[in-house]
Image (cartoon, rainbow, N blue to C red):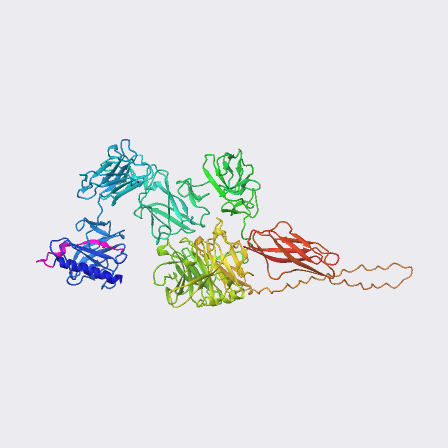
Amino acid sequence: MRRLLQLSLVGALASSALAAGAFAPAQADPLADVKVNEVESNGDTFDWVELVNTGTTAADVSGWVVKDNDDTHAVTLPASTVIAPGAHLAVNTDDPAVTGSFGLGGADSARVFAADGTTLVDAYSWTTHSAITYGRCPDATGALVTTKLATKGAANNCVSPVHITEVESNGDATDWIEVHNPSPVAADVSGFVVKDSDDARALTFPAGSVVAPQGYLAIDTDPIAVNGFGLGGADSARIFAADGTTLVSSYSWTAHATTTWGRCPGPSGDFTTTAAGTKGAANSCPSAFDPLDVKLNEVESNGDVVADWVEVVNTGATPADISGWKLIDADPSHPFVSVPANTVLQPGAFFAFYTEFPPPGFGLGAEDTVTLYQADGTTLVDTYGWTGGHAGTTYGRCPDGAGAWQETTVSTRGAANACSPIRVNEVSSNPNDWVELVNLSNAPVDVAGWVIKDSTDTNPTTLPSPTVVPADGHLLVSTLAAGLGSADSVRLLDPAAKLIDSFSWTAHGVPTYARCADGVGAFVASASATPGAVNDCPGLQTQPWWGSATVSVSDEAATFPADASGVTFDPSDPTGRTLWVAQNKVGTLWKLTKDGATWKPASGWTGGKNPRYADGTGAPDTEGVALGTDGAVYLASERNNDVSGVSKNTILRYQPTVSMSATDEWDLNPLLPALGANLGLEGVTFVPDSVLTAGGFVDQSAGTPYDPADYPGHGTTLAVVAVEGTGQLYVVALEQTAAVQETAHLVATIDPELLTNAGPAGAMDVSWDPETQRLWALCDDSCDGTTVALELDDTGAFSVADAYDRPVGMPNLNNEGLALAPQSACVAGHKEVVWSDDGDTDGHSLRSGTVPCTAPPTVEPPTSPTPTPTPTPTPQPQPQPQPQPQPQPQPTPQPQPQPQPQPATVTIAKVAKGLIVTTVGERERLVLRVVTSPAAPTGTVRVRLSGVDRPLEARLRDDGRLAVRLPALQRVGKRTLTVVYRGDDLHPRTREQFTVRVRRS
């Protein structure tokens, strides 16, 4: 309906133009009189080009052709199209009802040709969409500029050309505002209104106020005679047209300039501090600053609450105008991030800007580079690159602007860097008050004269001389002048009163607040107080990697430039010699085959293949890869790298032998929390419905046991995705219909309990191992390479069963992928495991080791465990009587048979069926049974739990019931409970072990 209405409007304009000139006795030369007058390239309904007849007679434009910068795009004006003298005609270019229609781009042209299609009548080109339209000002005769208002088919609405060029806000005699007229004709500003930031204060240019061509005119703002006003230290200068509402020009500032604020280079440059005030004349601009005085100073690559950011500092003695300067990361396909207009850095000043906002922007990787250019986008100013993962805080120069780059103590966006290696590390506020400091350097640090304060400035604690924090060590400050409250702070300041570190809390820490990981992480409630020692952090209790301790490089150096992320074995190859790898940023899919000990691109896969969205466009940032039961490749993508500053979490299905355009797309953004563009999907895998239903998996969205029939069309598996920004795993049902844009349903959320050293959770990949029926979740170098195995527990949820350190022979790499070979690929009881390193350390992205081949798990029977038989003690031989000498020889007595001892057994077993499960932070009572034969147990029992340094409380009753008190444990994972019956007169010493699973509430 809207399109038909617009076509009628165009027809009406054409008819009006024809009627206006219908009685003209003759036609002028339209080639000279018709001009492009206004262009709309970003229209809400249609793009259009407006023509104007500047002549004195009607212009017949029948058959004329309108084109953009592509000769194949052409709209022909219909017959009998005549433009009357002074009239306007608008032509819609992208109306589908018009033959040859086309849209106008952000960088494009509007060209008008005579009816022969080759004679150019007029043209206008632009490099970006106008915020409104481009139009001739004055109408029909002036140059094309940004208009004040779109006026399709009518005279243009133009803004006065005058603009503010200089402001004196702290004048000794008077404050004033200067305007400049850049046009070649005089500009009458009579009646124009002058205001500061307050609409109640206004002055008017007197009658006869004219700004000469290329000239300047200043007006005093604070003459008492005309009820003027002064300009403040943080204020604005605004010029309005005579109607008092149409804004012509404005400038705002936050402090008085030492001279004046003026455009430099004048009169069209950005505002800066001038060398001297030049009221009513061309500006006196300061000597040009040296661009190399501006240095990159601090980088946040792992996102604050908003996004990633980069900070610069002006190390020179001259203000530095960095307006329009550009920043880019290591990926040249990313768009530049530009510094806003009017950004002037005073000497020593800092400026920080986000790289992801406003979109499209880009996120910064764990191993990346930032490069700063001048406004031309090619003149290099400074660059910095890092490897080894995200900083726990930020990377910054120490000292500011000139020093080497290092990990800072704390993030200081827009301020001087925190470079001290000394940090507040642990705080106790109840019952005893103390503060622990940590030294992150490998040299002792003298902190004599440093000051510790609480949330107030009263009763500071000054550290005496000598006070030294040892290298890589801790210092306990147990005597504080100010007591620490339940809601309080600890602040550490150096002798110059510079804040070095701080921590605040709203309730007492139980038992303390501590950085986890020690020295570098965020503050959390500790597992136990450790004054003067390494912090005891809650969380996973890890054990050594269960496979080979050594790993080997298993790819060719030339295969991956970097960014190898997801990895999975192809289940259709039982030999385990086919591997798929998802490469992020570039967004490349690789199929590899094994050649000896090296993974190489498969035939036809040299260089990989770049996936696209279903419409054939875009560059999915593919982080995870899995193969479905249908044989298709499924990729997890967190954004479109063509618009890299916008989060777009999708699962994409491909049939690579047919096309690299997705056959199906599942948008997960509605199911997930709001995420940074570079903090989304990292891994994907599939778990069979049969395993989930057999294990009693609970559908958290319904609060009932999972029923595959609740999700028709989802196939026979559920997908599990890993999300970096939350550190969680999400179980989703993927509907698969004839549509391309498919529907996904959130079924459950799984917490793999992976925490980065800096504190936030992190999950970089997830993989299903059908042999062990375990989900494997991986964290990268930010967690020191921890991997967890999750199993279905008796509540119907996946919980951590085991947590493993990375193999001792593997460096702390930025591993973002983990793949276990199928059981059918076992050789001598072991199978391959592959890690993918996003950082391509030492030129290699894949590393391989082995893990034991394990049989599929068996479900624990719902009965008491079978008693473990105790070996029957071996009877000890009795001493044999020796013959006594007799006066007369006598027959030697024969030994008599000794009675055999009765068999004695001891069995230690659980009373309740199922697993032993306890909850983090809670004390639990466990009951076991000690069964002895042939008599009741009369001995004592000793019970120990791994990770607890003293025996547990345990009481053995006469009936053999053993009550054990489990302590409140702070780490998720498995513990070993060892029970020893020490034996008695009849029964032997017996030892039994049980597994205790610790999980979150």
Task: Give whichever of 599, 316 is nearer the camera.
Answer: 316
Task: Give whichever of 620, 22 is nearer the camera.
Answer: 22
Q: Position of residue 155 (x, y in %)?
A: 19, 52
In the shown orientation, is residue 852 left or right of residue 816? Answer: right
Q: Is residue 739 above or below residue 153?
A: below
Q: Position of residue 323 (x, y in %)?
A: 31, 44
Task: Give whichever of 824, 894 is nearer the camera.
Answer: 824
Give the extent of the magenta segment. Answer: 22-42
Q: Quadrant of residue 606?
A: bottom left
Is residue 749 located in the magenta-colored stretch of the structure?
no
Going 66% across and 63% down the picture, which residue do you hit?
Answer: 867
Task: Give whichever of 434, 818 is nearer the camera.
Answer: 434
Q: Position of residue 531 (x, y in %)?
A: 56, 42
Classify the position of the N terminus by image quarter: bottom left
Classify the position of the C terminus by image quarter: bottom right
Q: Is residue 190 above or below residue 146?
A: above
Residue at far right of view: 887
Is residue 40 located in the magenta-colored stretch of the structure?
yes
Q: Position of residue 519 (x, y in %)?
A: 51, 45
